[in-house]
Image (tube, rainbow, N blue to C red):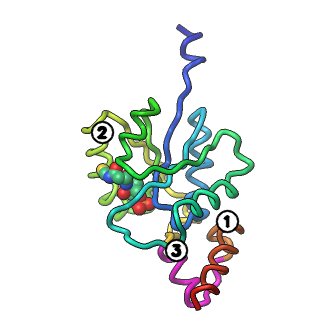
Amino acid sequence: MAQSLASARNVAVCPGSFDPFTNGHLDIVDRARRHFDEVVVLVTGNPTKKTGMFTVAERVALIQSAVADMPDVKVDSWGGLLVDYTSAHGITALVKGLRSSLDYEYELPMAQMNRRLTGVETFFLLTDEKYGYISSSLCKEVARFGGDIGGLVPPAVMQAMNERLREVK
Ligand code: PNS
């Protein structure tokens, strides 16, 4: 019994749009990996968010650079239902960050729907107070108007955002 427990791979998926990946996301991934053998950061399509600053491939590359020193973290993308990805890979856990009751209201129906569809469980980590006000959309808005987002996103993300904003000017 102890042997089979020790050999079971306990994998969690951290899903999101990640347009772009912030230091708040990075903190959740870093904390999730302490409780799972492997964490997959999964860039998924959000039908309510039509256009992005970065393509899915660019988001994946930026996340890969941010987690380069975390060998137990993989990055992938998926265009279908999240539960189809988890089922196909035998994954039974999702991890998401909660900043506030607003996040809770948004996340609760998705967690319940996902659980109804396949039984996949969603585990919520409370966002560290340092990152409670950070969102991808707020970072983009501040950056677009020339505000400083240093320390709010990984350095490679900040560089890519600055380049993208220069391109569109
Ligand atoms: O970072 P976001 O945009 O809040 O993440 C939401 C996301 C992408 C995780 C959610 O929209 C999602 O799971 N999309 C994949 C499609 C899907 O499974 N939709 C049904 C959700 S119950």
Q: State the image coordinates of residue 161 (x, y, percent, origin top left).
A: 62, 76
Q: Residue at x 59, y 92 (%)?
A: 169
Q: In the rendered view, tell whether residue 26 sits above or below residue 71.
A: below
Q: State the image coordinates of residue 4 (x, y, percent, origin top left).
A: 55, 12
Quadrant of residue 44 in the image? bottom left
Q: Quick one: label 1 or label 2, which is nearer the N terminus? A: 2
Q: Residue at x 57, y 87 (%)?
A: 168
- Do the residues bearing badges 1 and 3 touch, measured as CB atoms within 8 Å? no
Disc 3: CA contacts within 10 A as few (<14), some (14-19) or many (>=20): some
Q: Which residue is mark 2?
A: 115
For label 3, the SS is loop
Which residue extends farthest right? 69
Q: Quick one: label 1 or label 3, which is nearer the N terminus? A: 3
For label 2, the SS is helix
Report whether the residue tagged 2 is closer than 8 Å to ligand 1: no
Q: Quick one: label 2 or label 3, which is nearer the N terminus? A: 3
Q: Which residue is mark 3?
A: 53
| Residue 56 numbered tag | none
Amino acid type, label 1: Pro
Disc 1: CA contacts within 10 A as few (<14), some (14-19) or many (>=20): many
Q: CA distance from mark 1 to mark 2?
A: 32 Å
Look at the image and give the residue range highlighted in magenta: 137-149
Most common secondary structure along the magenta stretch: helix
Q: CA distance from mark 1 to mark 3?
A: 16 Å
For label 1, the SS is loop
Q: State the image coordinates of residue 167 (x, y, percent, origin top left).
A: 62, 85
Residue 11 among magenta residues: no
Q: Which residue is mark 1?
A: 154
Q: In the rendered view, tell whether residue 103 sits above or below residue 146.
A: above
